[in-house]
Amino acid sequence: MKFRGPLDERPVSEADIQAYSDGTLAGARAAHVRRYLAGQPGEWRRILFYRRLNAQIRDAYPEQAAPPLNAPPRPRRAWRYVRAFAAAFALACVALGWVAVSEPSQQVLNDAAVMALMEAENAKPGAPATPEAILGPASAPFDLGAAGLRYLGGSEVRLGPFASARRYVYENGEGERVVLLGARAWLASGAPQWSAHRAGALRLLMWRQGGTRWVLAGNAQTRGLMRAADLATMPPRDSGAP
């Protein structure tokens, strides 16, 4: 069906009526349709019917309804994904930064082990006790009895504003003490086999396992020192083994 207007304008079509009802017709064409409707009062009832139908469709399917011409464009779903990914990436960077500053390096842990060993040796009976030498009731991470070492106690050692380690003190039958330090090492690769480092008359035995960096410190001549490192790094036996 065609609706004819002035001879110098294209006749109003059914598509024009539908577009005007939807609010998507603009400019001179919309003005032309309004002039046509002014002379066709009966057509307004059809326009109102179309608009009520469009409103019902928008209410039933809000995500699929077309936005008004002057409304700001909605953010695309892909942009929402980008923002979510950026937020997750920022949180991951913060978490990695916290892990980095809270994990002591190998050198820092080695230095702390030497200092802890000196404190443990100075805390022997007859020596003046200091607050740092008082050992807490922490349980031992390894049973080193097979190496001739008995557990004395443990405490926490601060290695910086955010880093710390756990200190465990053992003693052999001759009264010689060794110190075991353990600190978190989530970013370091595992090294279950121990390696040795000499520091003057001292020996440092180091390994990494289960997200923990371990250092066992003692005098190079201390009986049971190397055997203790073997026991600490020994893989667990199968439950069915004798």
Image: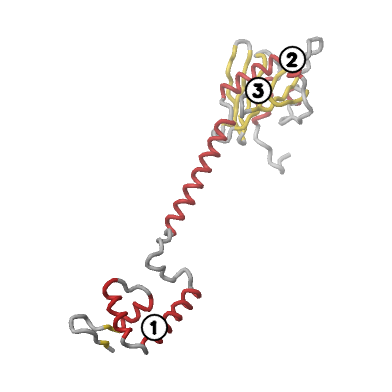
* Mark 1 lies on residue: 47
Indicate which disc residue 216 carries.
3
For the question of whether residue 196 can be seen, the reply is: yes
Furthest toward the left, the residue is 8
Residue type for callout 1: Ile
Q: Which amino acid is tagged 2?
A: Glu
- The three-letter amino acid code for the residue at tag 3 is Leu
Please report the residue visible at 27 percent of the width from the left and 83 percent of the height from the top: 12
Question: Which residue is label 2 attached to?
Answer: 176
Q: Position of residue 227 (x, y in %)?
A: 68, 23
**1 or 2: mark nearer the eye:** 1
Q: Is residue 174 visible?
A: no
Say the numbered circle drawn on residue 202. none
Circle 3 SS class: strand
> Tag 3: Cα neighbours inside 10 Å, few (<14), some, or many (≥20)?
many
- Alpha-carbon span between mark 2 and mark 3: 14 Å
**Distance Cα–Cα, label 1 vs label 2:** 100 Å
Depth check, front residue: 173 or 168: 168
Mark 2 Cα within 10 Å, few/some/many (few <14, many 20+)?
A: some
Measured as percent of width and height from the top left, residue 65 is found at 44, 71
Element under disc 2: loop
Indicate the quadrant containing the N terminus: top left, top right, bottom left or bottom right: bottom left
> Residue 103's image quarter?
top right
Q: Nearer the viewer, mark 1 or mark 3?
A: 1
Residue 128 relative to residue 85: left or right:
right
Picture residue at 48% right of the left edge, 70% below the top: 62
